[in-house]
Amino acid sequence: MPGSSIGRLFRVENFGESHGPAIGCVVDGCPAGLMLSEADIQTELDRRRPGTSRFVTQRREPDAVEILSGVYEGRTTGTPIALLIRNTDQKSRDYSAIAEKFRPGHADFGYWTKFGIRDPRGGGRSSARLTAPTVAAGAIAKKLLREAFGTEIRACVTQVGPILFPVENWDAREKNPFFAATENGDLIQEAEALLDGLRREGDSIGSKIHLEITSLPAGLGEPIYDRFDARLAAALMGLNAVKAVSIGEGFNVCSMRGSENNDEMTSDGFATNHAGGILGGITTGAPVVADIAVKPTPSIRKTQMTRDIHGNFVEVSTTGRHDPCVGLRASPIAEALAALTAADFLLLARASGERLTKGGSAL
Amino acid sequence: MPGSSIGRLFRVENFGESHGPAIGCVVDGCPAGLMLSEADIQTELDRRRPGTSRFVTQRREPDAVEILSGVYEGRTTGTPIALLIRNTDQKSRDYSAIAEKFRPGHADFGYWTKFGIRDPRGGGRSSARLTAPTVAAGAIAKKLLREAFGTEIRACVTQVGPILFPVENWDAREKNPFFAATENGDLIQEAEALLDGLRREGDSIGSKIHLEITSLPAGLGEPIYDRFDARLAAALMGLNAVKAVSIGEGFNVCSMRGSENNDEMTSDGFATNHAGGILGGITTGAPVVADIAVKPTPSIRKTQMTRDIHGNFVEVSTTGRHDPCVGLRASPIAEALAALTAADFLLLARASGERLTKGGSAL
Amino acid sequence: MPGSSIGRLFRVENFGESHGPAIGCVVDGCPAGLMLSEADIQTELDRRRPGTSRFVTQRREPDAVEILSGVYEGRTTGTPIALLIRNTDQKSRDYSAIAEKFRPGHADFGYWTKFGIRDPRGGGRSSARLTAPTVAAGAIAKKLLREAFGTEIRACVTQVGPILFPVENWDAREKNPFFAATENGDLIQEAEALLDGLRREGDSIGSKIHLEITSLPAGLGEPIYDRFDARLAAALMGLNAVKAVSIGEGFNVCSMRGSENNDEMTSDGFATNHAGGILGGITTGAPVVADIAVKPTPSIRKTQMTRDIHGNFVEVSTTGRHDPCVGLRASPIAEALAALTAADFLLLARASGERLTKGGSAL
Amino acid sequence: MPGSSIGRLFRVENFGESHGPAIGCVVDGCPAGLMLSEADIQTELDRRRPGTSRFVTQRREPDAVEILSGVYEGRTTGTPIALLIRNTDQKSRDYSAIAEKFRPGHADFGYWTKFGIRDPRGGGRSSARLTAPTVAAGAIAKKLLREAFGTEIRACVTQVGPILFPVENWDAREKNPFFAATENGDLIQEAEALLDGLRREGDSIGSKIHLEITSLPAGLGEPIYDRFDARLAAALMGLNAVKAVSIGEGFNVCSMRGSENNDEMTSDGFATNHAGGILGGITTGAPVVADIAVKPTPSIRKTQMTRDIHGNFVEVSTTGRHDPCVGLRASPIAEALAALTAADFLLLARASGERLTKGGSAL
């Protein structure tokens, strides 16, 4: 059923399978007049591209995006923006070994139960490859937010298995293979050793991503149901392999007192930001802060027991190219999903003439 | 903007303010032919009602629900079911002391920035009272799911501040003031002492809720964006005061290996349920398991600093009736939100003739 | 399925049955800050009320509307506005004579096929009574449009059977029993004689309604699918008993030439308005002009043959209170539906920062 | 704003501009398991293709459709079906002569007011070329309906200016240049003479289309707002150049009596079909019958007065390739729009387990 779109007024319709002819999306609702080029989108796509280090999938394809519509003479026209990415590196492998098995940790069983038919090649529709259109669409949303409010959206890896990366320097993210916001060489080496070991063992590991949105206006989100936190949680939980989403203090609040957790107000906005920039479902103008848990890559070389579509018990192990830590390239995708969520609420707020203010400066 | 509805095919439109004439909702999309009485709904409403112990709000009103439409001779007719709950206990208090102040931990500042107008009486639209229509609608969804698949949805409190309640006996929940699924008298006494102390100090405390959905069919949810986990996260994060949502192992996955976290399949379904019943966004037929973090009640008697709508620094403290631990009555609301999410996906699956199976038994 | 709402950003959810406890609606999406009282809504409701002349249904109930939410101190708050109208005049008649028969010209057969259950009392959900919530919601949309742009929306009856009423004087509408915009006494007498005769014969007659929207901005509507004309056609065709909708020249265009039908532009906007204010799906700033055909009331005293739910051939005739010409009170409803359509597009246009101009004056 | 989609459960997102790189659509919601090939779609596209007679646009491009996703081994997979049609015949003409002028009868003025930017090449987004994706998506809907219920959807031209074509033989449609369902050679010659004359004069003419849907189940559509007639009217009115839509007797009902217009029931369904297969917004199982008015092509060679974006009065005439009677190729598009509407309602009905019956045979 038509569940392949995200957003209400800034809406993205995603299509494609990992090894079909192409993947892509249609962005419907982007206002007219935004300067937009393929390069704007390609820059973001390149940030998530597999093959950028030895710890991520070795699939090497350019993921070159083509804008098919909605842009004229370098500006958006207010009509749907279709983005196309051809699949060029689908090896004609033999998928018959796994086509009928339900791989542990994968959508296979639910998928087969649901549809009764499944494109098994490279994960088909369930492949992480389908996050590329999300990133492409998110690039447009990011640009819209940046131009409207100077909004910046940044995510980084803060944990890989037992190793914690502090958030010290956003610029460091693309200088290490972990998208970590730190220049601490010891931690990076420790993580490299961990991942090299996992690769040898044919195993994988989980990770955590930290996300921040700064300079987002106060006043976005509805009091009930369609809250900013609810939509953000949906977007982020919908990212492949994510099993938890928290805002601000997250699960810490379970043991906090009201007097600790409440954020008092000052002349600049808020004295603290335990709330992570959202109160009662509505943005406060303070940075929106979220964390997500990414499970270990389910495709592992180690042998596991499962069943096939005929009800037989069978062994399964994955032999293709896979990431030992799928979270390593999740940050740009998390940024894109946050951007899509924020852009959508921005348009909703404009619709009713709501009084947007930056960073709590309405006072 | 129209964000006060939840669901796509089983849709609930929520209306009302805490101290206006009435609150309620319209349930649009419930199939025809379901036996339904006001008693079915009242039972669920009574489970969340304030005033059931000394630890929850002392507001005492019956929250009597009236079915205005969509039911004829005891059965649903397939047309919208309007549910009305009159507000009968709105004390004509003087709200001028807080009407212009932005209470820390509350939606006040974002709300004022957004709308420029606000009903301050009893929290207005942001009051937890507005969860009553959600519970009422959820009662219908629960009944629909139970009759279709024997689905059961249960939630309980598993943490209050530093105290952890094990999930041992669901029937114990309504025998203690904490909605805890345990008969461990020591833990209950410890928690009572904690809350009595908080009440004296004028402070509050956070809590954690555990949720389980059993006998839900495999195959619900879409692979991208409109995933079961994404919609469930949105529903639960949208519950007042919730700051985190996790599925299955949740944040534990950050440090787990693939070989640990993957659930192997057996003749009964799955050998383990680290996934919490959802893989790749689609239900597996195993129990759906989620946890949510509920922040401490923001309304506290302790004095805090904030600002008012004129930009002045001011002191604020709350004097009305409030819960020291707002999570204590969140369980029935979480159940309702989960039921609404599941019922919606059930109808979506039916639309496309998808092959629903109970508990993985499709094999 | 949830089809009882209209609008996307200015959305109305309609509920109720003719002889249930109440009818009403929830208006979700009305911007904050609009002055609004029950009197504003009641005025419009009174214009459609049955019992205002001897030619319309003799049911006499006040249709008193109650605002349950979304208004505080006389202004809208940006939250859902719930409107309630209690049913007070449901005579406890015996409906068994028709409960199992499919009345010709009514929804009965399709309804029974669809739902398998039906509230037969007074037409149940299919009763024209359910247009009252539409009119109530439309009153809010009208006020919003009037305050934003001075938009006026007016409809009148232009045909009753063979009698044509010219559109000469809008103020005359409420001075004759036909809602005709003429003071031509001969035509009025002729129509009275026609209707008196039909009443004696137990028969009914069709009619035509003319609608105009003036001072509506240019630029509303999308080029494809979600066009202003498409949404307006849906709204008006959705009015009970309507069988045709035309814009501007309507069916006349079938025999017109391009050189005749095209509207040249002048300094004031357009030299002519064959297009009825909409070109390519987008408003031009010229008045939006539409006509609708309303079929004769299907409930007639004359005996007709039909079937019942058991498959028997049976006679049926209607004995309750009914209008011989159901179109006589359709004008305020058509106005309300046009207002809801226009308000919705207005908010959509605001969302994307579109450049609205009144009456083509953008030049 | 995101208005470029049609349908709720069987949803089509349309993208592209007449002279951009490509046009196309994404069909989201088609159930899994339908046999589908590019040939199935191409067949329908070829029926609307320009260049099939001397009376329609001379643009000659193959309109070859490519399925990018959602089909695996010849069957739909339940995931979005993206359809791509490359634009291959965009002559690099000079559009500067009309780029700044508001052409009479076109969307230009409203479009410019709305977006402030416009792709003028070949009509851009407003071009009739954008009906090709609608036809492509409609081909899938048609196949789905045919396989589920044997539903057939057929449209033909019944009027060109003063010439009326009777509906005598559906097979005759593709044997004459007018898509008329008649083999009456005299009428065809008369129409040819008319169009040849118009072409010499540089003028154009309006037309009328007749549509029938047979073997559609009873019970589709909701009683209020989301009625089958309302959605069908929206779909058809949204077709370029359509100015009126009628169901069954249409505007004839204005002068009919209830005793004439009501359809009595027989053992086969209905004795007559004045209602055009829809009563109270719900299908009856009788054929759905609609007529639409298509205005004369607004692009004419004759000189007209208009304004440009600078406010100057200017002359304008169209010199490119255009159809003298745009309605001649509207029939396959009307069929597609009807198919999309019906498929959407079919899925909605399935969602709630409604009791669909063919042709009134529920009895």
Image (cartoon, coloured by chain):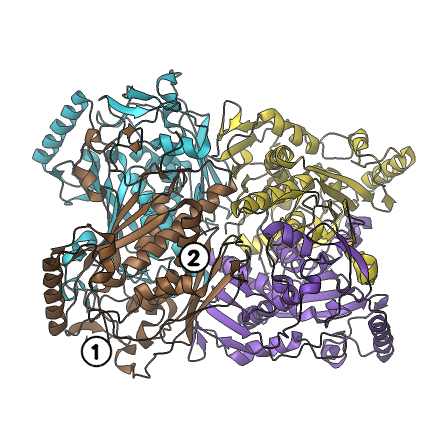
Chain colours: A purple, B yellow, C cyan, D brown
Classify residue C19 as left or right of residue D128: right
- The answer to which of marks 1 and 2 sits earlier in the sequence is 2
Tell me the subunit letter for badge 1: D
Comparing B336 with D351, the one in front is D351
Image position, residue D325 (x, y; %): 20, 65
Image position, residue A262 (x, y; %): 74, 53
Using the image, determine if residue C1 lies above or below residue B176.
below
Tell me the subunit letter for badge 2: D
Q: From this viewpoint, which residue is outermost toward the left?
A: C186
Tell me the distance, in whole angstroms, between the alpha carbons under discs 1 and 2: 36 Å
Local SS, label 2: helix
Image mark count: 2
Comparing D144 with B329, the one in front is D144
Comparing B73 with B301, the one in front is B73
The C terminus of chain A appears in which quarter of the rendering? bottom right
Q: Could you tell me which residue is drawn at 81 percent across and 70 percent down?
A: A165
Q: Could you tell me which residue is drawn at 22 percent across and 76 percent down?
A: D312
Q: Are marks 1 and 2 on the same chain?
A: yes
Tell me which amino acid carries mark 1. Thr
Task: Report which residue position mark 2 lands on.
Answer: D140
Local SS, label 1: loop
Using the image, determine if residue A288 lies above or below residue C153.
below
Q: Could you tell me which residue is drawn at 70 percent across and 62 percent down?
A: A98
Using the image, determine if residue D206 lies above or below residue C141.
below
Which of the numbered marks, if any, corresponds to residue B305?
A: none
Task: Report which residue position mark 1 lands on.
Answer: D319
Which of pointers 1 and 2 indicates the residue nearer the eye?
2
Image position, residue B91 (x, y; %): 62, 32
Q: How crowded is mark 2: few (under 14 residues within 10 Å), some or many (20 or more)?
A: many
